[in-house]
Amino acid sequence: MIKERRYHIKTTDKEILKKWYGLMTLGRALDDRAPNYLKQAIGWSYHAPYAGHDGIQLAIGQTFDKDHDHLFPYYRDMLTTLSAGLTANEIVLNGISKATDVAGGGRHMSNHFAKPEWNIHNSSSCTGNHPLQGVGTARAFKRYGVKGVVITSQGESSVSEGYVYEAINGASNEKLPVLFVFQDNGYGISVPKKDQTANRKVANNFSGFKNLKIFHCNGKDVFDSMNTMAEAKEYIEKNGTPAIVHANCVRIHSHSNSDRHELYRDDYEMNYVLAYDPLAKYRRLLIRYKRFTEEELLEIESQTKEIVKEAHKHGMAAPDPDPNSIYDFVIPEAYVSEKYPEGLHDFKGEPKKLIEGLNETLKAEFRHNPDTFIWGQDMANKEKGGIFNVSKGLQQEFGPERVFNAPIAEDFILGTANGMSRFSQKIRIVVEGAEFADYFWPAMEQLVDTSHDYWRSNGQFSPNITVRLASGGYIGGGLYHSQTIEGTLTTFPGIRVVYPSYADDAAGLLRTSMRSKGVTLFLEPKALYNSPKAAAPIPDDFEVPFGKAKVRKTGSDLSMITYGNTTHMCVEAAEKLEKEQGLSVEVIDLRSLSPLDEEAILATAKKTGKVLVVHEDKVFGGFGGEIAALVTEKAFEYLDAPVKRVGSPYTPVGFNRILEKAILPNTDRIVAAAIDLINY
């Protein structure tokens, strides 16, 4: 049953009508002025005009309650954020990228408005990816039993992105309090809606979803937008399930200041959209129904001009970002171990397998911090605990509220982790990012976005997530089951990448990852899960710091620098070379790739003068190239030979064991390369 409409031009309080008109005129004045900053080379080099979306954007902001709700706006949401409480000063500071911009201190593109302290989130430029984050935040609402609604806003064309489907599917499946707003202006830059979807109303693509209510409104009309948003929010608050508001709008101007809409819109259409200008319509209504006189409206418009003038002065006087600040907030400071500052121990207990170390550490950390959660594919169904049973027993002990399955959608897994961590900095999240590391690629969009959240927000938000990935080969898995991807992952500032090869280091690094703020990619060599050679005694409280390598064997003739599966091969090769050749070989197990222990690498290079870098990945483009470059740049004068690398050839990993053996490095190849280097 449709509730009686709350707002009408005849009955709405005059002060409310005045407030709305003030916001609408202020927003439009700023919207119209923004391009002038670019023309004057002051800033605002990206501006997406919102004119034509006035009704729905005013309504989103007025519906939002900063004390209980969370808002994920998109780059066209200027009036939305003004209506939600941002000031003209804050809008201008963002537009001209000043250091005092509350969204991110000039670090993010202009027109990306946010105020994290009010739960108006700093969203990326990646079109349509923030609904996943909104769903994650709403999951926290449900888990912690708090009141409120998460509102996400986007254009209708961004709904073509797969992760929007994943977000809505997840929200309806988990019954989460999310309000998805689609602002439909008929275009994705120049692409007409008919080229995006068969449905004229894109929200109707989701009409078959259970637990999902779809509302339609005229986004050009203030009252219809206000009533629909209020009704949708009330529906969510009452039922705890998601809703979509599809708002029909017009786009009066070009998509952005880099677009020329006259190239694809004719005069008839341009005149049509101007005739449906929401601000002009609202003004006419106020006069027609005698709620305001012409003089009263002119007075409001005069006040708006003064506000914009003062905001401009304030913005021009504001400081620019300091170029020396670029290294601030790249990644949060990690948890620091007091008992194990070097990640070393002399514990003499019974050796445990690597998989045991991971499983026991997960359970210990879940007991340590009740705000810890884990999810992924195949995570928790009866006795199953992940594809390799690393998380076995977790759901039985900690319950389905903290340990649960996710859809087969890697973007969803990581995107909702980002969003859930936004609810509270106490929360620590562990996800199995994919069944195997090779399947992680669909989540890369979310990983890239998550990697610069801390920097982009100027330190206001840190996603605190450990992403576990079963990595590497030597299992006869072939494509999508045997690749190793650290060469790609380490290219992103803002995330840590660790790759243990022994049970104690796996446990210690996992504990540090889960206690640290920020994002850690935790690569687990799955071939070593149950391998006796990776077993080691593990103290109950063991911690390994990031960026600290471990000397597995000391030596003076040659250095092997390695990690992961090949660590054991290097130790075997070093022992063989010592026994058969009388050579003294030092083996350095990096354990942590980003941050990297440069001190240990350079120390061993200077000590032996000959460096062999060994890893499982391809030599070309592999992480070993960074190690070789580091040694060449900073220890060149100490070298007695070129830095040599051992890894896989530039091919995928084959499924047949014969092909796999021909591709992946082994002890014999390492021995041969070491002898070549010694004889240089």
Image: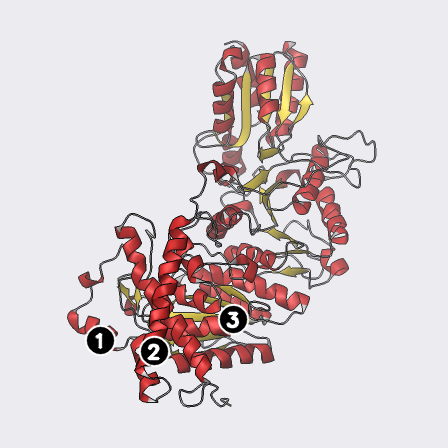
Residue that label 2 marks: 297
Image spot of residue 650 (x, y percent):
43, 32
Say whether residue 329 is left or right of residue 225: right
Earlier residue among tags 2 and 3: 3
Amino acid on which disc 3 is placed:
Phe
Between residue 151 and residue 565, name the one nearer to us. 151
Q: Provide the residue designation for mark 1.
A: 272
Q: Nearer the viewer, residue 606 or 302?
A: 302
Q: Residue at x 34, y 89 (%)?
A: 289
* Residue neighbourhood size for the residue with mark 1, other residues' Cα within 10 Å, grouped as few (<14), some (14–19), many (≥20): few
The Cα–Cα distance between marks 2 and 3, rounded to whole angstroms, is 26 Å
- The residue lying furthest to the left in this view is 267
Q: Amino acid at mark 1?
A: Tyr
Separation (CA) of disc 3 from disc 1 = 31 Å
Mark toward the start of the polypeptide (1 vs 2): 1
Q: CA distance from mark 1 to mark 2?
A: 25 Å
Q: Secondary structure at mark 3?
A: loop
The residue wearing badge 3 is: 64
- How many neighbours does mark 3 have within 10 angstroms: few (below 14), some (14-19), or many (20 or more)? many
Marks 3 and 1: which is nearer the front? 3
Q: Which residue type does callout 2 highlight? A: Leu
Q: Position of residue 79 (x, y in %)?
A: 40, 67
First-in-chain label (3 vs 1): 3
Label 3–label 1 contact, CB within 8 A = no
Residue 304's place in the image compared with 656, above or below, is below
Residue 241 picture quarter:
bottom right
Chosen colour scheme: secondary structure
Residue 38, position in %: x, y?
29, 51
Which image quadrant is residue 345 in? top right
Say which residue appears at 64% left-offset and 68% top-offset: 142
